[in-house]
Image (cartoon, rainbow, N blue to C red):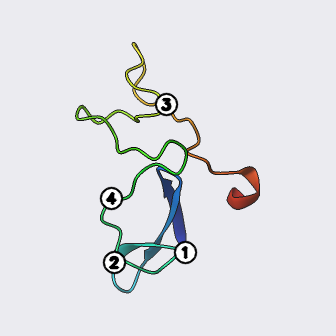
Amino acid sequence: MAAGAYVRGHLIVWDEKKRKWYYDDDGSVFDDSRVCNRCGRFPTVEGYDACIGYVPGKDSVCCGHGVSNKIME
C-alpha cells in the first residue's frame, strides 16, 4: 500500500522498499527544498507557512498550498 502526503502543495509518496519519501512529479528524493505552490515562498524562519504566518493558539494551519480537490481525490 502506498502512502502519500502534500508538503507545501507538492505531492510526496512513500517507497516502502527504499524507505524514503519521493516527489511524485519527478521522482526525486523528498528534501523539503521546494517553495509553496500557492505563494511561491518558503516557510518563515520560525517554521510557519509563509502564506499564513503565526496564528495564536493554533498548533497547525494550512492554506491548501494550491492543492485542488481534484488532485486530492
Q: Residue furthest top?
A: 56
Q: Amino acid at mark 3?
A: Val
User: Of tags 3 and 2, which is closer to the observer?
Assistant: 3
User: Compared to 13, does 37 lie above or below?
Assistant: above
Relative to 70, is 48 above or below? above
Question: Where is residue 71 shown, x and y percent of the image?
Answer: 70, 60
**Marks 3 and 4, the one that precedes in the sequence:** 4
Measured as percent of width and height from the top left, residue 44 is found at 30, 35
Residue beneath label 2, please? 19
Q: Is disc 1 placed on a helix, strand or loop?
A: loop
First of labels 1, 4 by sequence position:
1
The residue labelled by disc 3 is 61
Q: Earlier in the sequence, mark 3 or mark 1?
A: 1
Q: Secondary structure at mark 4?
A: loop
Outermost residue to the front = 40
Residue farthest to the bottom, as pictured: 17
Dot 1 alpha-carbon crowd within 10 angstroms: few under 14, some 14 to 19, many 20 or more = few
Q: Amino acid at mark 4?
A: Asp
Rounded to the nearest angstrom, the CA distance separating label 1 from label 2 is: 11 Å
Q: Which image quadrant: the N terminus?
A: bottom right
Q: Residue at x 37, y 21 (%)?
A: 54
User: How many residues crowd around disc 2 within 10 Å: few (fewer than 14), some, or many (20 or more)?
Assistant: few
Q: Is residue 11 left or right of residue 19?
A: right
Q: Which residue is mark 1?
A: 2
Q: Are marks 1 and 2 in contact (CB under 8 Å)?
A: no
All told, the count of numbered labels is: 4
Alpha-carbon span between mark 1 and mark 4: 20 Å
- Amino acid type at circle 2 is Arg
Residue at 29 percent of width and 36 percent of height? 47
